[in-house]
């Protein structure tokens, strides 16, 4: 199996409907007809998301193929394996990790904001970003995250927004010599800010795609220029009077 077996709605030729809705059914702003912020929309209505989803699934599919290949080799070796099964267990853990990432990007979207620990969500977004084959040359790093209140947003939608923002910065960095992306978090009791900044020689301006701006607006966040990058500003769960 290889990347060529990836088709819309399938991974390795297997339908992914059992893992969640990859396209039309993943709704933001509505579940059971309940709107978010007075607006009902699907992820299909977010520009650029379908292309982003396909790039993510392609990368995860590639990782799954590698894990299955390694597991097959280890099983074939059988009792001749010198590692007492350690290698097989490691590959199974990596396969589970890849499956978890796939579930993250196709999970149903809750219409209601909740308290979200941003440090955890950023780690997930960076892990997803690292699976991308098209941006493999771009290293994205997260600076130490200070203790801040949780942010107030729909969790799955915010994860998708962070993935889009990282990809926007990654594309700018990819066009530069020795490009990279740095993510820094700051904030206070009112708001939490995520600065996503591409770096590199001869860096072109970071282009924020319409889908990134649309999704930020729909979940109540704002985007502001931040040096060569963009800063995402999110409301905190606790506000001072």
Image: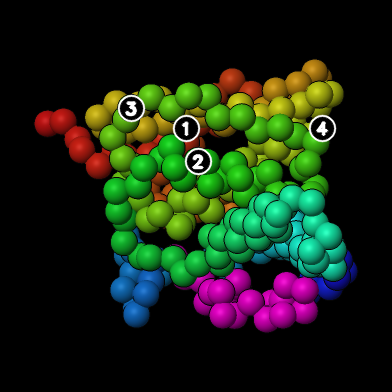
Mark nearer the viewer, 4 or 3: 3
Q: In this view, does 68 lie above or below 19?
A: above
Looking at the rendered image, the quarter that the C terminus falls into is top left
Q: Which of marks 1 and 4 is nearer the N terminus?
A: 4
Give the residue at mark 4. 175
Q: Which residue lies furthest to the left in this view?
A: 241
Residues under labels 1 and 2: Cα distance? 9 Å
User: Can residue 229 be seen in the rendering of this structure?
Assistant: no
Q: Are marks 4 and 2 in contact (CB under 8 Å)?
A: no
Residue 147: mark: 3
Residue located at (56% from left, 60% from top): 100
Dot placed on the residue nearer the N-terminal end, 1 or 2: 2
To which residue does mark 1 refer? 194
- For the residues labelled 1 and 3, the Cα–Cα distance comes to 14 Å
Residue 122's tag is 2
Q: In this view, does 62 lie above or below 206?
A: below
- Which of discs 4 and 2 lies nearer the camera? The answer is 2
Q: Is 89 covered by the magenta stretch? A: no
Q: Which of marks 4 and 3 is nearer the N terminus?
A: 3
Residue at mark 4 to residue at mark 3: CA–CA distance: 34 Å
Q: Specify which label sits upstream in the sequence, 1 or 3.
A: 3
In-image side of 155 versus 198 (left or right)? left
Q: In this view, does 41 lie to the left or right of 1?
A: left
**In the rendered structure, are the residues bearing label 2 and label 3 in contact, judged by CB atoms less than 8 Å apart?**
no
Instruction: Report the Cα–Cα distance between label 1 and label 4.
Output: 22 Å
> How dense is the environment of label 3, judged by Cα within 10 Å: few (below 14), some, or many (20 and up)?
few
């Amino acid at each position: 199996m290889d990347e060529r077996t990836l088709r819309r709605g399938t991974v390795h030729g297997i339908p992914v409907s059992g893992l969640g809705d990859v396209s039309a059914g993943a709704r933001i702003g509505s579940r059971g007809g309940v709107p978010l912020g007075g607006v009902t929309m699907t992820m299909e209505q977010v520009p650029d998301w379908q292309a982003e989803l396909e790039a993510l699934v392609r990368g995860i599919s590639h990782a799954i193929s590698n894990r299955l290949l390694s597991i097959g080799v280890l099983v074939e070796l059988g009792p001749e394996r010198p590692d007492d099964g350690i290698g097989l267990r490691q590959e199974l853990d990596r396969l589970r990790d890849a499956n978890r990432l796939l579930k993250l990007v196709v999970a149903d979207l809750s219409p209601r904001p909740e308290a979200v620990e941003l440090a955890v969500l950023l780690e997930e977004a960076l892990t997803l970003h690292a699976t991308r084959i098209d941006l493999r040359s771009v290293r994205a790093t997260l600076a130490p995250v200070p203790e801040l209140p949780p942010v107030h947003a729909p969790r799955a939608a915010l994860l998708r927004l962070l993935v889009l923002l990282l990809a926007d910065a990654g594309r700018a960095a990819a066009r530069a010599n020795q490009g990279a992306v740095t993510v820094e978090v700051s904030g206070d009791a009112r708001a939490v800010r995520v600065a996503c900044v591409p770096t590199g020689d001869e860096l072109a301006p970071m282009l924020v795609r319409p889908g990134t701006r649309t999704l930020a607006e729909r979940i109540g966040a704002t985007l502001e220029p931040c040096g060569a990058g963009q800063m995402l500003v999110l409301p905190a769960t606790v506000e001072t009077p």
